[in-house]
Image (tube, rainbow, N blue to C red):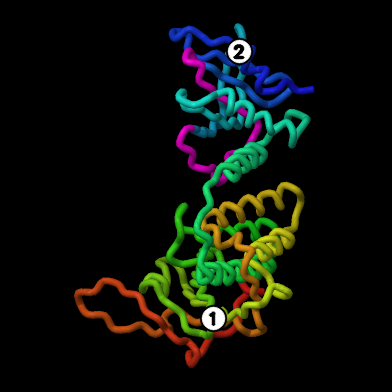
Amino acid sequence: MPETIKDAWNRLLRPREEDGLSAAPVRDTNCWIFKNHEGSLGFLMSGVHEPSNPPKLLHIEMIYLPEKRVHEGDSVLSLRKCLEIHLDPSCDADLLVAILDRMADHEPSGKYSTDLLMTVIGQLLHLVKRPNRPPRKEEVVGAWGELMLLHRMTRSGSNPSEVQRRITCWEAEGNARDIIDFRFPHIEGGVAIEVKTSTIGREHHINGTGQITVPAGFETGLLASIIIRETDGTSGLTCAEVVTAIEESFRGDENEIAGQIRALHSKLDTRGPSCYDERFSFILPEREIKLFDMENVPTPSAPADVSDMEWTVNLENLEPRGGHLLLG
């Protein structure tokens, strides 16, 4: 049976200040424990991949290293593909050790992974997280339309690699929300799609000219207008159920599906809690997704001293373009 992280931590002696760090392997696992003269905790897993979207934590620092050299007695070992955790000295190291040992309940072999570590940390954050304001229905409606469009785009992907790439094209500019919902630089000379979803008609709020401006380097810019209908919950899908449907559509081998799931959840975290809503159910009637060229969306005239503006546009009488391969 693999050694517990707690036992490895307790047997590791605190070094003198001039000696730097002391280190010990957690026997029969891919982990190491570090301790400095203050008793501060360091933890390492080797042979793991870099976390795609690690949580930002105030007292815990995560570092990914392609290679790490550690001293064990007179030997120097070279560990590859390492994820390190460093705990702030002001925090209780024994408490974090107990949390890390939770991994053994999920993986008794002692071969721990990045995904498992993120799961355990996520469980802790969920346990102590303060309740957030539930998203407004309008926010859920917007997320539902984007998720449904993503579902169609992933189903029409030609192979697992293309499916994962399409997922990464959602909220694609940096780690924050993008002004345009989807950017596909590799398809048809570059396709950008802004999604607007409504339950009352084809009247949409435009949050600035950037939402209907074809990005530089892209040949095509589209506004996807989606009309959905709310149900009483006996039919239709919630946002959380659309997410499940997307995950169930993934194909490929075990590693390929895991990659698609990691990419999806990274984007869900960026898009926000509306994607996990379970309160509201909607259906998408046939032929209620229409695509409009961005340059054809009506734009009000602005005075010379106005740099940007928001407005509401009614697309009911605007001629849409034909179908698009991204939508299947």
Residue type, label 2 = Leu
At 48% across and 42% down in the image, what residue appears? Answer: 56
Q: Badge 2: how crowded within 10 Å, few (<14), some, or many (20+)?
A: some
| Residue on which the image places disc 1 | 291
The earlier-in-sequence mark between 2 and 1 is: 2
Quarter where residue 17 is shown: top left
Quarter where residue 297 is shown: bottom left
* Magenta stretch, residue numbers: 36-59
Q: Would you say 106 lies left or right of 142 here? A: right
> Which sits in the foreground, 124 or 16?
124
Vertical arrangement, residue 42 with respect to residue 163, above or below = above
- Where residue 100 appears, x then y in whole percent? 64, 30
At 55% across and 29% down in the image, what residue appears? Answer: 84
At 54% across and 22% down in the image, what residue appears? Answer: 41
> Which sits in the foreground, 79 or 106?
106
Task: Tell me if I can see residue 27 in this picture.
Answer: yes
- Where residue 43 appears, x then y in whole percent? 58, 25
Vertical arrangement, residue 231 with respect to residue 8, above or below = below
> Which sits in the foreground, 62 or 184?
62
Quarter containing the N terminus: top right
Mark 2, secondary structure of its residue = loop
| Residue 12: assigned label | 2
Residue type, label 1 = Leu
Mark 1, secondary structure of its residue = strand
> Which sits in the foreground, 262 or 283?
283
Vertical arrangement, residue 44 with respect to residue 15, above or below = below
- Does the stretch in magenta take in 293? no
Quarter containing the C terminus: bottom right
Give the main secondary structure of the magenta stretch.
Answer: loop
